[in-house]
Image (tube, helix red, strand yellow):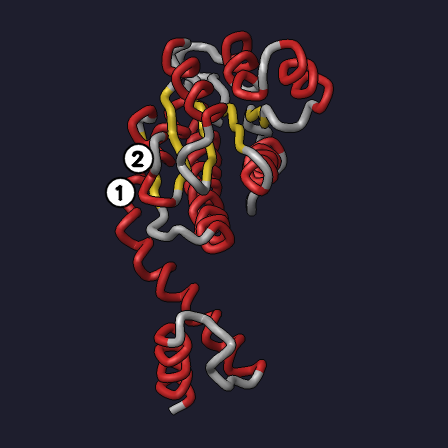
Amino acid sequence: MLKVLSRTVYKEFKNQNNTKKLNLTNKNEIEAKILERLDLINSSISLVPEIEKSSSAIIKCLKKGNKVVLFGNGGSAADAQHIAAELIGKFNLNRKSLPAIALTSNSSTITALANDFSFETVFSRQCESLISKGDVSIGISTSGNSTNIIKALITSKKMGAITIALLGNNGGKIKKYTDIPIIVKSSSTPFIQEIHRIIYHIVCELVEKEIVKTSKKTK
């Protein structure tokens, strides 16, 4: 009964276009916001093939002794660092450290490149020197239109990397510049970020399980 009521509140909330015209208690509004996110999670099941492809590409890369390189702006920069931390440290299992670099974490490099060249080159310039053939390069952009992400993906491809992009907003311009676009079906930045985190946690878990399984076989 509560679930049906919550769904009814959510539909009414959506019909009012999230304005203050609807007289909701804080509890009902919170329930509606949670259900709105659940709908997006459910629709994201369609991304399973891309998530599987991404996991397989990263596993293949790491098994060959290559690395994962990540980049994004703002909240997506934090996500890039989050993924790198999960790989270098651990997600759930005790295992060897996996090589990953977030290009967002060195403020001296970023500000030097932005000052001496342009902010559009802060990731592509790093990719030029750090990417090796067989690496995986992951760009994150909720808008799908960040120029510095596009340039970094293009450079990564030239250097021989497999490219993956975590996107929103129908993929924006970036979807044309990546091997594996993972596009969250939303134009809401916070919603896209929340689904990105679910996706990359799944990827980290799948990668870790396979790497641990392989290492056990070789002992």
Label of residue 140 in the image: none
**x 34%, y 40%: residue:** 182
> Residue 56 occupies which quadrant of the picture?
top left
Quadrant for the N terminus, please: bottom left
Q: Secondary structure at mark 1?
A: helix
Q: Secondary structure at mark 2?
A: helix
Comparing 69 with 19, the one in front is 19
Distance of label 1 from label 2 (alpha carbons): 6 Å
Residue 131 in the image: state x and y as whole percent: 49, 13
> Residue 74 occupies which quadrant of the picture?
top right
**x 49%, y 23%: residue:** 148
Residue under numbered circle 1 = 49
**x 39%, y 44%: residue:** 168
Residue 54 in the image: state x and y as whole percent: 36, 34
Which residue lies most toward the right here? 108
In this view, 69 is above or below 80: above
Comparing 7 with 170, the one in front is 170
Q: Is residue 63 visible?
A: no
Label 1 close to label 2 by CB (< 8 Å): yes
User: Disc count in the image?
Assistant: 2
> Residue 96 occupies which quadrant of the picture?
top right
Q: Is residue 183 visible?
A: yes
Which residue lies most toward the front here? 21
Residue 71 left/right relative to 5: right
Label of residue 53 in the image: 2
- Amino acid carrying label 2: it is Lys
Residue 115 in the image: state x and y as whole percent: 67, 15
